[in-house]
Amino acid sequence: MHYTIYADGGARGNPGPSGAGAVVRDECNSTVALVSKFLGHHTNNFAEYEAAILAFKALAKLVPEDKRIHTRVSVKLDSELVVKQLLGTYRVKHPTLQHQNARLKEQIALFGDVSFSHIPRIQNKDADLLANTAMDRGA
């Protein structure tokens, strides 16, 4: 099975009120999970990581544990920084982001084949809307 996660996080003021949004789609491009959560006072990079973490947690609820190792997951983010940190191109220097990075890697380890790619913001509009909706709820 193959799933695609579109994840986005944002903060108004950076740091400021933040939210996470994600859409999980199956190989038929059907939406199987949505995430929209107000996160409190954080940076946009914290929120971007949190969106991916929450999306993986939602996916883990859908995929039986014995099937996860055979599941391919493509993660699409519009944060070039976070993608490059996950790919090892950039170091994760900030302690809070180091923690977020470690939390996300724990989720990644549950699945067989996980890839990350940077996409333009316009291709991530559904996740962006969910993140902004979360920030609106929390404001």
Image (cartoon, helix red, strand yellow):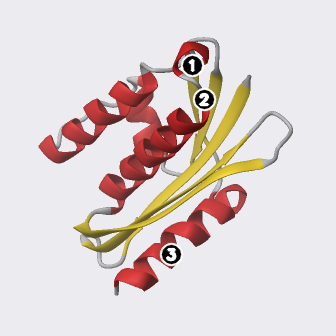
Q: Residue at x 42, y 19 (%)?
A: 109
- In the image, 119 versus 18, the foreground residue is 18
Q: Which residue is disc 1 drawn over?
A: 68
In this view, 19 is above or below 50: below
Q: Position of residue 97 (x, y in %)?
A: 24, 43
* Furthest-right residue in this view: 28
Tell me which amino acid carries mark 1: Arg
SS of the residue at dot 1? helix
Q: Which residue is disc 3 drawn over?
A: 132
Tell me, yes or no, whether the two marked residues, 1 and 2, touch with CB atoms within 8 Å.
yes
In this view, 67 is above or below 77: above
Neighbor class of circle 1 (other Cα within 10 Å; few <14, some 14-19, many 20+) is: some
In this view, 10 is above or below 85: below
3 or 1: mark nearer the eye: 1
Q: Which residue is drawn at 30% across and 54% down?
A: 46
Q: Where is residue 85 in the image (x, y as percent from the top left)?
A: 37, 33
Tell me which amino acid carries mark 3: Asn
Q: In which quarter of the image is residue 9?
A: bottom left
Q: Residue at x 30, y 78 (%)?
A: 13
User: Alpha-carbon distance for marks 3 and 2?
Assistant: 27 Å
Tell me which amino acid carries mark 2: Val
Q: Choose the circle earlier in sequence order: 1 or 2.
A: 2
Q: Choose the circle earlier in sequence order: 3 or 2.
A: 2
SS of the residue at dot 2? loop
- In the image, 47 versus 78, the foreground residue is 47
Q: Which residue is disc 2 drawn over?
A: 63
Q: Residue at x 74, y 22 (%)?
A: 1
Neighbor class of circle 2 (other Cα within 10 Å; few <14, some 14-19, many 20+) is: some
